Amino acid sequence: MEKEKKDRGQWASSLGFIMATAGSAIGLGNLWKFPYLAGQNGGGAFVIVYILIVIFVGFTIMLGEITLGRSTGLNALGAYRKLNKKFAWVGGAGILAAFTILGYYNAVGGWVIKYIVQFVTGGVSGDSAVFFGEFISSPIEPIIWALVFALATAFIVWKGISGGIEKYSKVLMPALFVLLIVVVIRSVTLPGAGAGLEYYLKPDFSKLTPAAIVAALGQVFFSLSLGMGCMITYGSYLSKDENIEKDAFIVPLMDTSAALLAGFAILPAVFAFGFEPGVGPSLMFITLPSVFAAMPLGAVFGLLFFILVLFAAITSSISLLEVCTAYFIDEFKWSRTKATVVLACAIFVLTILSSLAMGPMANVLIFGKNFFDLLDFIASNILLPVGGLMMCIFIGYFWGIDNAVAEISQNGKYAFRLKGFWTVLVKYIAPIAVGIVFLNMLGIIKF
Ligand code: PFF
């Protein structure tokens, strides 16, 4: 029994939980996806919609998931099963999503490490598009860097909740914010930064199409690590003394601040040097290295930037691995060591395949997608929305709002100030919003 408890673990402090949870949320999604989504989809208009969705859907689902986790003290699947056997599959789908996302997240984490090494040795010279293209399409090198990233992730998870995830998040998250602010100051003070600020923030409501709103909702899910049992798992290591209403407010606030700051860090610099902001990986791995190459002291700022990206990525990847690890520790009574090693290895098989999909296996298409894009599609477009939708339905109509409220307020010990607001959101607004987005993603309704 003692050993089991030790393998499961618990957060040592409230701050540690907040840092770890914010660490999970703040990741690659904030740093490269948010800025270009905002720029493309109407600037300030998109930012306003994004923030509204964070408040109405993000906060709601985050609080719901943390509640399920803390109430049961179990992994994603175990938590649902304990409360209602028929919903166990929802937790299972979440664990599968975490497994799948980490498969390709490792590959990108490896690219980030490669760029850090590159900046230590002076930066990317020559054509950065050619450099990136040659690097990711080579068969062996990206896999080696991905392995370094995966080993670092596994090491932290193996060290446990308070001794690993919490300890590292408490250092890496504040460091990330400091580095981000340094890069923001550099970026917005460059001559010509104004054009980037305009691209980023000038509201253009004509670009705010239904498709842009759908993109915002998908982004809120991915960015806040929702719909996959991550918050259930992290919530399961909380003591009953924690005020989780407050946490579900602070974490989205931190995550959104990081996303907004990332826009200020990236877009003004891109425009100041006359580049066009790329879309997707090309913004971070092709456009930005060219920007740093053109900037005075660019190698230093480039290095700082990629270190902060690494910190963001690793505090997210550990949460993905922990979702899977917790399941095997709880359900199969595996030791933490065994669960970490076996799962990290199994996930790395997906990583190898997604890395090869960028080069030697680029022509192997499944449903018209290469392996990397396939993993992303299955997780982000199917498993996450289903997870979020089912969670709302479960809490709203099966487990019941009263049980949830009793857990959140600890039977009245904490005033649950937003109780009425949250109830309406969980039962009606969030599931309808997520349902619409899901049907759109599947192409069943089209905007
Ligand atoms: N929230 C992370 C990001 O924005 O990059 C990605 C992520 C981590 C998604 C953990 C889901 C998760 F459980």
Image (spheres, rainbow, N blue to C red):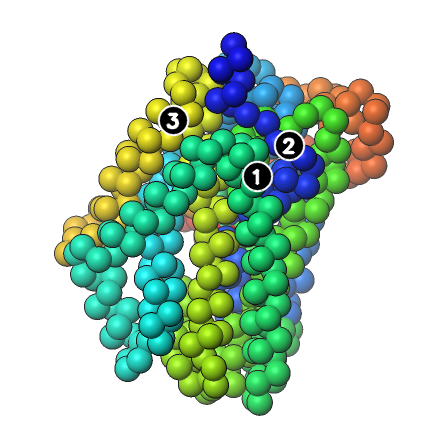
Which one is earlier in the sequence, the residue at label 1 or at label 2? 2
**The residue tagged with tag 3: helix, strand or loop?**
helix
Q: Is residue 166 above or below residue 235?
A: below
Q: Which residue is denoted by mark 1 in the rendering? A: 166
Alpha carbons under labels 1 and 3: distance apart: 17 Å
In primary-sequence order, the first of circles 1 and 3 is 1
Mark 2 is surrounded, within 10 Å at the Cα level, by few (under 14), some (14 to 19) or many (20 or more) other residues, namely: some
| Residue 12 numbered tag | 2
The three-letter code of the residue at mark 2 reads: Ala
The residue to which callout 3 is attached is: 337
Q: Position of residue 323 (x, y in %)?
A: 46, 32
Residue at 35 percent of width and 44 percent of height:
150
Q: Secondary structure at mark 1?
A: helix
Q: Position of residue 231 (x, y in %)?
A: 57, 35
Circle 3 Cα neighbour tier, 10 Å, few/some/many (<14 / 14–19 / ≥20): some
Asked whether disc 1 touches disc 3, contact meaning CB atoms under 8 Å apart, the reply is no
Q: Are marks 1 and 2 in contact (CB under 8 Å)?
A: yes
Callout 1: CB less than 8 Å from ligand 1 = no
Give the secondary structure at mark 2: loop
